[in-house]
Image (tube, rainbow, N blue to C red):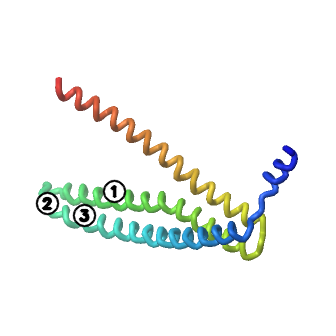
Amino acid sequence: MEENQNISLFGLSIDPAAKAHLSEAARWARFLAIVGFVIIGLIVLIGIFAGSILGSMTGGLGGNELGSSRVTSGIMGSFFIVIYILVAAFYFFPCLFLFRFATKMKTALASNDQETVNSSFQNLKKLFRFVGIFTIIMLAIYAIALVFGLLGAGLSRM
C-alpha cells in the first residue's frame, strides 16, 4: 500500500482543473509583471526629473562666491537620481522572474512540455526566494532600528 502512495506522490500530473488554474495564474502574473515594468520606467523617469529639479531649485540658495551651494545641490540631485535608479533596479528582478514564470507557463501548457513547466516553476521559486530574502533583511533592519530607537529614547531621558 505504501508503494502505491510513493508512485502517486512522485507521478504528479497536471489535470484539466490544475491546467486552468495555472493558465489563469500565468495571465495574472504576466499582467502584474508588465505593470511592474511600467512602474520601473516611471520610477526611473521620476528619479531623473526630480533629481534634476532638486538640483536646480537649490542651486540659487545661499553659498559663497565659489559656488559651493551649486556643487552641493548637484551632489544632492545626483544622489537622488542614483537612489531612484537603484530602487528601480532592485524592483526589476522580481518583475523579471514573474514575467518569465508567466511566459514559460503559458508556453508549457500550450505544448505540454514538462521541461518548460519545470523552468517556469524555477522562476517562481527564484521570485519567492528573492522576496523572502528581502523580507528577512528588512525585518533585521527594522529590529536594529527599534533597538537603536529604544536606546536613544532611554538615553534622552537621562
Q: Say which label, 2 or 3, has the lower sequence index.
A: 3
Give me the C-alpha separation between circle 1 and circle 3: 10 Å
Q: Which residue is mark 2?
A: 61
- Mark 1 secondary-structure assignment: helix
* x 20%, y 55%: residue: 68
* x 19%, y 57%: residue: 69
Q: Which residue is mark 1?
A: 79
Give me the C-alpha separation between circle 1 and circle 2: 18 Å
The circle on residue 11 is: none
Residue 81 drawn at (x, y percent): 35, 62
Which one is in front, 33 or 59?
A: 33
Near mark 2 (Cα within 10 A), the count class, few <14, some 14-19 or many ≥20, is few
Q: Which residue is mark 3?
A: 54
Residue 80 drawn at (x, y percent): 33, 59
User: Label 3 near label 1: C-beta < 8 Å?
Assistant: no
User: Label 2 near label 1: C-beta < 8 Å?
Assistant: no
Relative to 150, does residue 100 appear above or below in the rendering? below
In the visual, does 61 lie left or right of 115?
A: left
Give me the C-alpha separation between circle 2 and circle 3: 12 Å
Q: Amino acid at mark 2?
A: Leu
Which one is in front, 95 or 80?
A: 95
Q: Amino acid at mark 1?
A: Phe
- Mark 2 secondary-structure assignment: loop
